[in-house]
Amino acid sequence: MVNNVPSARRLNGTGPTNNQQQDDDGLLPAIDATPKGYTIDVRVFLAIITTAMALAFTAGVMIGPTNPALVNPVLSLLGVPLPVYDAPNTSIKSITASKKGDPASNINAPARKTAEGTVASIVGVDPPSTSKKAKEVLVSADGEVIDNDEVVIKQPKRTRTEHVATLGYKIKETHVNIDTPVLEGTGENLPYERDITYNNINRTESANGEEQPMLRDQSNPSGQHLLVDIKNVEAAFLNSESRLADAMQASVKAGGLTMLSYHCHSLHPAGVSCVGVLLESHISFHTWPDEGVITLDLFTTSEKPLLPVLPKIEELFGIARVNAETGEKEEIVTLWSHELRGFRTEDARKAHYLDGESDLANWVTSPLEVVYKKQIITMQTEFQRIDIWDTLERDDTPSYEDGLRLGLKAGDPRWLSNEHASPSRHLFLDGTLQTIKDAEQEYHESLTHPAMFAHPSPKTVGIIGGGEGGALREVLKHKTVEKATMIELDGKVVEVSREYMASLNNCTDIVGSAPCCFDDSRTNLIIADAFQYFLNKQIKGEFDVLIVDAKDPEEHEEYTNPNVIDALVASLTSNGVMAVQIGMAPSILDPRADKGVNRKRELLINNLEANPNIASIHIYEEAHCGFWEPRSFLVACRDVSCRKHWYAETDEID
């Protein structure tokens, strides 16, 4: 029988080696049992793992966000002293169960509110009120141990992570005084009688014979909303509840609104949130003192316009901060937006110049990305409302003129910044965009020169509208012109354009002309309703070229009247040419022309086609006029010979 048990001789290493053959007993070769690497006692390994886990758990409790129920045993194990509140008559259970605002929770040093509005305690039972050994503190849901309004153990808030063992980024905490406002009050020292009875706030007052809007029309579910963001404001001002409340009340007073009450809450470490309850609705704002920013919104149900109060808001809240490096005051930066809110009747909506469909709202008052907005002038004339604004959008860059003015070279980074771009000036009539200073040349050249070149030698030219003078300027560039008669409905447009849109009527580069095109010896300016002027005068064969620079056809009923069109055509000479701007270019997605929004334009074309004195009609488009969509123009000729010039090559015309 074979013995499989190794002999003692082999176990102690005295027997044959592995290279030796088996002995006579048939035993296997001896194995070398000497360790060939590092060894560790399994008991030591388990002890190290257990210690590491304990340390990791302790670190997680002390550093990361944790539940108060988990932190209690660890704090007790570490022997952290936990002093008790001096509240012998208040049981810990009443503290734990108390909600914010509960009279039962009135203790000397209230704890911070948890997410649920409750506070937690280290100790879970009622200690005897006479015990001197009991040590109680309050622990928030974030693990902060608080004693007498002092944070004993600070647990920073962190962002959520996918795994509980992963620490998120620390969150900068902002605590709000939510128990009671730091500052509150009612409107005081009003400049008018504070009568807010129903009959008073809904009556229409009359001052100097003019109708005034109601303080609040309860039957009209509409309003106005003004959003204002201001940057580079003094930190001390943004952190002062009293100064901010004074500015808020002054803003309300400047807008002719009625303050009912206001409430301001401080934020820790910095900032203030305020809201003012108005008879007309509300005003509210929030501040970031370190960043020098305040965001404000004012909503009213009154029909009193809010835009006039905007400069006062900028003055009251735009207290410039001092740059720490230069010692100079920084420039106040203001972004704002105005919107009409609620539900208005269709007629009231269309009649309002700041309606969401108006160009003034879409181009200037509504978008926040227009970083610079400055109202140059606004006035209501006998015929229309005139508005001129300077604007600069966020993505605007310097123009060719800006480059010359600043001496910009190729590769200069200032080419890519709107800080070095000049604002563009816009002219609006009844909220409809008429002229953009930066693109008016493309528009007026496209309107004027095709018709002027279609005539072999234009001497007398008529212009309908065009009160800003752009079309007149382009006409006077032609040497053959002997007389240019301009018929403008509103003389105020001419006056305003002379002063605020001077570049459009600047004729200094025309040899022999006056500095202002309106003063050129060839100019004959007539203030009248042009369409009625042609109907009443029944002018026959006076103009070689007639240029209609009026509003879009959809805003003129006259274009649908065949008698008006016949009168315009009759005023042309036998080979006369008429040019008309006919609004936005049609799209392939538009409905049939006589059924869509451009129905009046189609009627204008039909009336021209039906006139026996019109021999040729040409329609063209220009996409560089500054508008969001390409513009369409029409040229109608009394003689078919104009086609020769229309289709001629450039060199031939020159």
Image (spheres, rainbow, N blue to C red):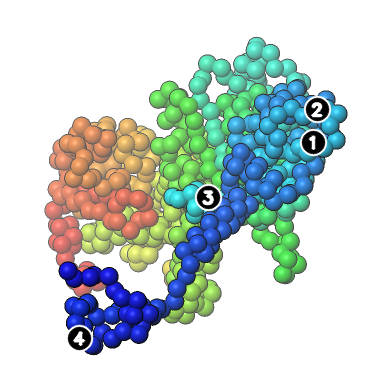
Mark 2 or 3: the one toward you? 2
| Mark linked to residue 508 | none
| Mark linked to residue 134 | 1
Instruction: Pick whichever, 413 or 374, lies toward us.
Output: 413
Sequence-first disc among 2 and 3? 2
At horizontal 46% and vertical 61% (from top left) the residue drawn is 396
- The percent coordinates of residue 374 (x first, y second) are 57, 51
In what element is the residue under mark 3?
A: loop
Quadrant showing the N terminus? bottom left
At horizontal 64% and vertical 43% (from top left) the residue drawn is 73
Mark 3 or 4: the one toward you? 4
In the rendered structure, the answer to whether residue 386 lies left or right of residue 542 reads right
- The percent coordinates of residue 209 (x first, y second) are 65, 22
Amino acid type, label 4: Gln
Mark 1 or 3: the one toward you? 1
Residues marked 4 and 1 touching at CB (< 8 Å): no
Amino acid type, label 3: Thr
Instruction: Pick whichever, 169 or 579, lies toward us.
Output: 169
Sequence-first disc among 3 and 4? 4
**Residue hosting label 4:** 21
Cα distance in 3D space between marks 4 and 1: 80 Å
Amino acid type, label 1: Ala
Amino acid type, label 2: Pro
**Residue hosting label 2:** 128
Question: Is residue 610 shown above or below 412?
Answer: above
Cα distance in 3D space between marks 2 and 4: 86 Å
At horizontal 64% and vertical 47% (from top left) the residue drawn is 74
**Residue hosting label 3:** 159
Sequence-first disc among 1 and 2? 2
Instruction: Pick whichever, 417 or 142, lies toward us.
Output: 142
